[in-house]
Image (tube, coloured by chain):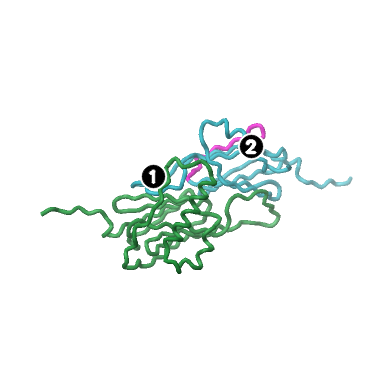
Chain colours: A green, B cyan
Amino acid sequence: MNFKFSKRKDITKTMNLIRYQAPNSTPWPALDRWSNLRDELNSFFDMPFWSGVGRTGQLFTGWSPALDLYESGDHFVAVVEVPGMRKEDIDISLHDGTLTVSGERKRESNNGETAQRTERYVGTFRRSISLPTRVDASKVSATYQDGILKVTLAKADEAKPKQIQVN
Amino acid sequence: MNTLTRETRESDRSQAEQFITPPASVTEIGDGYRLEIEMPGVKKDGLEISVENNELTIIGRRSLPTVEGTLIHRESRSENFRRAFEIDPSIDADKISAKIDQGLVTLTLPKAEHVKPRKITVS
């Protein structure tokens, strides 16, 4: 796995809207697709207008893996479903408070093989999420097991809950 | 249709348990088929594969990682996976093999010996 990090600018971004989906989400896959599209649109509109140029091609990507985000006092954990990947084909980057997981699933085709039905997505994918608070770019770790990528990000010191003593 | 791609959906409705239908790909290889099904979060122990009346059923029960903290954004679904296919009579059901690696189930379905092309020697 590769990690790429960039320093976050000094300006604290306004709190990003994290859309919450009820745990008993709809059984209709079409709606899942809509919610993915909505996420893509949300993250697109989150960006400063001109930096969106060149990114439009990603608006309608074929595969937007499901992502869950957990928050505890001092950590965020992002859980992403990316089955059937090789570790080395997964890229994780953190830029301006946005976590991006991307990668490529290569087509494994050999001569003399004929695809009868292809539902599995082949090609590159990219999935981003804006984290609600600042994180420490030097404290990010990831594991990949059973097709599930788990990225653990430590909150930056100023974002951790603090107990204030009354004198 | 001379392949195993005909899917059986009828049985899905009679099941009490709710399952997710995971994406699957079928490839015809030299003397059989390769079936790949995406089941993230499923380990070898959680996999149930059965053949009954020419119906191949693959059930994947997930053992999801426990994560500390509060879930603040969710897109994943917690139901288990199930996919069923009607297999072609040319497939030798006794020789179906399966493996799971990083949430990807790969089944190899070889054709029965009697349907493989063979040369007949003229005596």
Quickly name the residue at label 1: B66
Q: Quadrant of the C terminus of chain A?
A: bottom left
Report if residue A159 lies within the magenta region.
no
Mark 2: which amino acid? Answer: Thr
The Cα atoms of the two marked residues, 1 and 2, are separated by 34 Å
> What is the quadrant of residue B14 in the picture?
top right
* Residue A158, label in figure: none
**10 Å neighbourhood of mark 2: few (<14), some, or many (≥20)?**
some
Quickly name the residue at label 2: B8
List x then y, in percent, for residue A47. Answer: 42, 63
Magenta-highlighted residues: B41-54
Report if residue B46 lies within the magenta region.
yes
Which element is circle 2 on? loop
Q: Which comes before the other along the chain, label 1 or label 2?
A: 2
List x then y, in percent, for residue A101. Answer: 46, 58
User: Between B119 and A124, which is closer to the camera in this rendering?
Assistant: A124
Q: Quadrant of the N terminus of chain A?
A: bottom left
Q: Is residue A69 above or below residue B91?
A: below
User: Between B89 and B24, which is closer to the camera in this rendering?
Assistant: B24
List x then y, in percent, for residue B108. Answer: 63, 45
Q: Is residue A15 above or below residue B64?
A: below
What chain letter is assigned to the residue under label 1?
B
Work out whether disc 1 and disc 2 sit on a shared chain: yes
Q: Residue at x 67, y 39 (%)?
A: B87
Q: Residue at x 40, y 64 (%)?
A: A95
Residue furthest to the left = A167
Q: Residue at x 48, y 48 (%)?
A: A146
What chain letter is assigned to the residue under label 2?
B
